[in-house]
């Protein structure tokens, strides 16, 4: 994808996420993301449904492609996911990692011990919870939490 296409796709993902997590309306979510509702409806497929009253809602889960960045023993790795539940799991995991690195609180990392995600290619990746590894990556400046979503261009 070109940078513009990646940016458009990320905006679609942002709209679906806002609608699902915050109950935001399609109109508000598209306004906030800077994309047209018609484009989101065309690209999001079954991730957004229209109720009988005409209101659009996000499906409980979806299979939209997302590329996320996770820490591994060797540094950050981009992983393509087709499961919104795995993407949510990664976001929660990264929140736990950030909490550990910023506050020294490793309590939430235990939830992700021996937890893995499956990439689009079928590869299983176990989430890193070892504090020694996370400390090493954090000290090396490898871990940055601007966004878990990988993309070529910024908005």
Image (cartoon, rainbow, N blue to C red):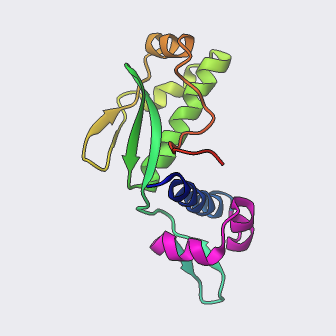
Question: From where the camera sits, is residue 24 visible?
Answer: no
- Check residue 122 for magenta coloring: no
Quadrant (top left/top right/bottom left/bottom right) for the N terminus? bottom left
Residue 144 as seen in the image, left or right of residue 136: right
The residue positioned 50% from the left and 42% from the top of the image is 150
The image quadrant of residue 4 is: bottom right
Residue 37 screen position, x and y as percent = 64, 75
> Would residue 119 be found to the left or right of residue 52 on screen?
left
Q: Is residue 69 above or below residue 109?
A: below
Q: Is residue 39 magenta?
A: yes
The quarter of the picture where residue 130 lies is: top left
Residue 86 in view of the camera:
yes
Examine the rendered structure and indicate whether residue 23 appears above or below residue 51: above
Is 77 drawn above or below residue 83 in the view shown?
above
Please report the bounds of the magenta region as a residue range: 23-47
Residue 70 image offset from top left, x and y in percent? 45, 33
Looking at the magenta stretch, what is its main secondary structure?
A: helix
Camera-side residue of 149 and 97:
149
Residue 48 in percent (x, y) is at: 54, 73
């Amino acid at each position: 994808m070109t940078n513009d296409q990646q940016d458009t796709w990320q905006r679609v993902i942002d709209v679906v996420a806002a609608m699902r997590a915050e109950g935001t309306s399609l109109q508000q979510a598209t306004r906030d993301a800077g994309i047209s509702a018609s484009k989101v409806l065309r690209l999001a497929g079954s991730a957004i449904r229209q109720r009988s009253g005409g209101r659009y809602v996000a499906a409980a889960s979806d299979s939209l492609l997302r590329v996320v960045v996770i820490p591994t023993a060797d540094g950050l790795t981009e992983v393509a996911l087709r499961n919104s539940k795995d993407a949510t799991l990664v976001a929660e995991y990264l929140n736990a990692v950030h909490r550990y690195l910023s506050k020294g609180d490793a309590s939430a990392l235990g939830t992700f011990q021996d937890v893995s995600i499956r990439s689009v290619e079928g590869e299983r990746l176990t989430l890193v919870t070892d504090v020694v590894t996370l400390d090493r990556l954090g000290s090396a400046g490898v871990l940055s939490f601007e966004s878990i979503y990988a993309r070529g261009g910024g908005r």
